[in-house]
Image (cartoon, helix red, strand yellow):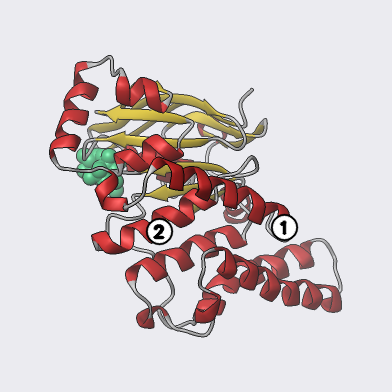
Amino acid sequence: MAFLQVEDIHKSFGQEEVLKGISFGLEKGEVLSIIGSSGGGKTTLLRSLNQLIIPDKGVIKVNDEIVFDASEGKLSESMLRDRRLHFGLVFQQFNLFPQYNVKRNLTLAAELLCKERGKAAGKSAEEIKKEIKQLDAKAYALLVKVGLENKITAYPGELSGGQQQRVAIARALMLSPDILCFDEPTSALDPELTGEVLKVIGSLKSSESTMVIVTHEMEFARKVSDKVIFMADGVIEEMGTPAEIFDDPKSAKLQNFLNKSQNLGIDDMESGFNAREWAKVAQDGEECLKDNELIRF
Ligand SMILES: Nc1ncnc2c1ncn2[C@@H]1O[C@H](COP(=O)(O)OP(=O)(O)OP(=O)(O)O)[C@@H](O)[C@H]1O
Ligand SMILES: [Mg+2]
């Protein structure tokens, strides 16, 4: 059984069936990129994994544990929240809290969780306080990881789009998700800021981190992924290794999509670095992870 197992996910909005039976598996430490034309259901799939959208049918398992099963019916809020914690999501539009500084953006949800779980486990106020104090160190370590420790007291409005997205990535990592999901993390950014965000995402690649990335950055997908899914009209039209998908596409729809992407010039030029640099980034990610036990992700 794969680390992430997605089985026969269906979702309709009104009369429109947007996901028509999606199934795939992903091993721990693997990176999956999801590509495809607009309206194909990529965001709906990612939101279904995070249960921001509740699928109509299907099962999702992480590490053999059921995190979603449509046949279970409606779950309590706290149970749903617990299940959601298996996934972290980085949005296209960053979605930082504008009224809080960077540190608070990182620690807020983790602190609430600490309190809730601590109380449920019967921990003393003293113990809970100690755990909350440790979150500061974790937040700092994650900001170092995304290269923004000098912005710890800044507010989102004082940061560039690329910096805000890097804070959003650190915030998602604060809750140590099993699987980190990105929905077109660079599409709201000016081209010159795209590279810095892709570089950070690439640096997270390690044997411990499992990621699902919806992206229009084809070269990035090729370099960072272990598997690629091409979605079209609510189904997985083709799935394979980057070489299979990008160098030997089988379906006419995928061939057509890749031709269009090339014509749009979506290539290395945009992210601004080459294969050797990507390899180096991935290696740095491993090293950084070994050095920092605070970050379980
Ligand atoms: N909340 C919603 N209510 C109704 N229809 C929706 C909703 N969310 C998505 N859809 C529809 O589902 C289809 C798939 O949308 P989705 O956002 O998943 O596509 P996508 O592959 O992410 O596209 P893009 O590349 O443009 O982001 C679209 O036809 C969209 O209009
Ligand atoms: Mg989308």
Residue at image location 45% in from the left, 43% down from the top = 276
- Count of labels shown? 2
- Position of residue 270 relative to residue 121, above or below, is above
Mark 2 CB lies closer than 8 A to ligand 2 = no
Looking at the image, which residue is at 55% across and 51% down? 204
Q: In front here: 248 or 90?
A: 248
User: Which x, y percent locates residue 281?
Assistant: 51, 50
| Amino acid at circle 1 | Asp
The local secondary structure at tag 2 comes to helix
Residue farthest top in this picture: 250
In-image side of 197 versus 17 (left or right):
right
- The residue drawn where x is 47% and y is 84% is 154
Answer few, some or many: residues within 10 Å of disc 2's Cα (few below 14, many 20 plus, some between 14 and 19). many
Tag 2–tag 1 contact (CB < 8 Å) = no
Query: In the figure, is residue 148 to the left or right of 228?
Result: right
Marks 2 and 1 sit apart, C-alpha to C-alpha, by: 22 Å
x%, y% of residue 10? Answer: 38, 29
> Is residue 286 positioned above or below 292 on the image?
above
Q: Residue drawn at (47%, 52%), measured in percent from left and top?
A: 201
Q: Where on the picture, by quarter, is residue 29? A: top right
- Going by the numbered disc 2, the residue's amino acid type is Val
Q: For the residues carrying marks 2 and 1, which lies nearer the camera in this image?
A: 1
Looking at the rendering, in which quadrant would you find the N terminus?
Answer: top right
Q: Residue 99, labelled with which disc?
A: none
* Residue pointed to by mark 2: 197
Mark 1 close to ligand 2, CB under 8 Å: no
Q: Which mark is residue 291?
A: 1
Query: Between 144 and 69, which is closer to the camera in this rendering?
Result: 144
Which of the 4 image quadrants contains residue 186?
bottom left
Q: Is residue 7 visible?
A: no
Residue 219 visible in image: yes
